[in-house]
Image (tube, grey):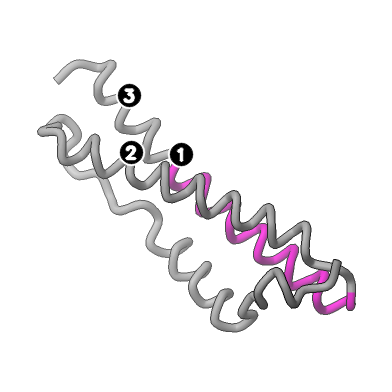
Amino acid sequence: MTVARESELRMALRHVKTGLGCIVRQQNVIATLRDKGLPTKQAEIVLEWLEEAQRGFEDHYKKMLSGGFVGVQHVQDPSPDIRDQARRRSRMNPRPSLAHSRS
């Protein structure tokens, strides 16, 4: 194992964790806007972009793990607490389709 390879894996994991945090924050922004009766369309578009980027971060991380990397003893699954929080937030405040959201 080289230090550079370990750093790549840790960087990929950091991207996954950071992306999850961004999604949770954006869901909170949408909920706040909705609670105040303000338009949410643009915030929902940003959330969709963040979710798309997150899929890319997670795919990259999984590819690195499955590529035979055995360096880091145990790399924890990307922040299950943050992922659970995002899922709970989604269920509490389901996003309407963009066609029905305020503009």
Mark sitting earlier along the chain (3/2): 3
Quick one: label 1, few (<14), some, or many (20+) residues within 10 Å? many
Quick one: label 2, few (<14), some, or many (20+) residues within 10 Å? some
Q: Nearer the viewer, residue 41 or 94?
A: 41
* Relative to 50, 6 lies left or right: left
Mark sitting earlier along the chain (1/2): 1
The mark lying in front, picked from 1 and 3, is 1
Quadrant of residue 57 in the image?
Answer: top left
The residue to which callout 2 is attached is 60
Q: Are marks 1 and 3 in contact (CB under 8 Å)?
A: no
Q: Are marks 1 and 2 in contact (CB under 8 Å)?
A: yes
Which label number is shown at residue 15? 1
Residue at 10% from the left image edge and 33% from the top image edge: 68
Quick one: label 3, few (<14), some, or many (20+) residues within 10 Å? few
Quadrant of residue 36 in the image?
Answer: bottom right
Q: Which residues are magenta?
A: 15-37
Q: Nearer the viewer, residue 84 or 54?
A: 54
The residue to which callout 3 is attached is 7
Majority secondary structure of magenta residues: helix
What element does badge 1 sit on?
helix
- Name the amino acid, label 3: Ser
Residue at 53% from the left image edge and 54% from the top image edge: 51
Q: Nearer the viewer, residue 38 or 14?
A: 38
